[in-house]
Amino acid sequence: MSEEITLHEMDLSSGIAAFEAKHFSRAAQLLSPLAELGDPEAQYRMAIMMQNGLGMVANPLQAFAHMKGAAEQGVGYAQHGLGYMYLEGDCVDKNPAKAVEWFQRAAEQGLAGSQTTLGMLYAEGIGVEKDPEEAARWYRMAGFES
C-alpha cells in the first residue's frame, strides 16, 4: 500500500511541476488518472487545462466536474474558480447567487481575490442584495482601507 501512495505522490508532484512549467500535455498525462480517483489538487489543475484547452481540446463539462470536485474538498483556488464559472456562465449556466456562495467559501479561507470579488458583488448587488457595508467589510478583509 505504501508503494502505491508513493507513486501517487510522485505522479502528483511531477504533474504539478509539469503544470507550473506549462508542459500541459505531460501534466494531463500524469494528473488525469489522479483526478479521476478524486485527488483535489489534480482535479483543480485538470479543470484549468480542460476549461482553457491547455494541452488538450477544451472540455467544459469535465472542467466543471473537476473544479466542483476540488472545490467541494476544500481547495480554496478551486472554490474561487467555481465561483468564477458561475459568475461568468463559463462551463456552467450563469448563477450569480451560487457564485457568491463559492466566493464566500474561498474568502473565508483567506483568499484576497475572493474577498475583493465579494466586495464588488455586494457593492453592485450581483447575486446578493446591494449592501455597501458588507462590501466595505470584504474590501477591508482583502487589505483595502476604506
Image: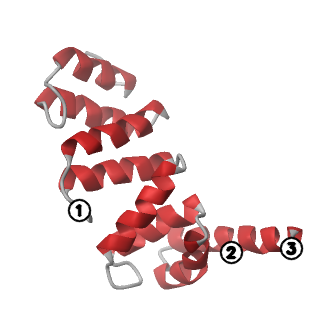
Marks counted in the figure total 3
Q: Is residue 28 left or right of residue 12?
A: left
User: What amino acid is found at the position of numbered circle 3 in the picture?
Assistant: Glu
- According to the picture, the residue beneath numbered tag 2 turns out to be 11
Front one among 144 and 126: 126
Q: Is residue 97 left or right of residue 22?
A: left
The coloring applied to the image is secondary structure
- According to the picture, the residue beneath numbered tag 1 turns out to be 90
Residue occupying the point 12% across, 31% down:
124
- The CA distance from mark 1 to mark 3 is 39 Å
Front one among 146 and 26: 26
- According to the picture, the residue beneath numbered tag 3 turns out to be 3
User: What amino acid is found at the position of numbered circle 2 in the picture?
Assistant: Asp
Q: Quadrant of the C terminus?
A: top left
Q: Is residue 80 left or right of residue 91?
A: right
Q: Residues within 10 Å of mark 3 (few under 14, many from 20)?
A: few
Identify the element where label 2 is drawn.
helix
Query: Which of the two marks, 1 or 2, is nearer to us in this view?
Result: 1
Q: Residues within 10 Å of mark 2 (few under 14, many from 20)?
A: some
Residue occupying the point 32% across, 24% down:
138
Q: Horizontal and vertical percent for residue 145?
A: 30, 18
Q: Quadrant of the N terminus?
A: bottom right
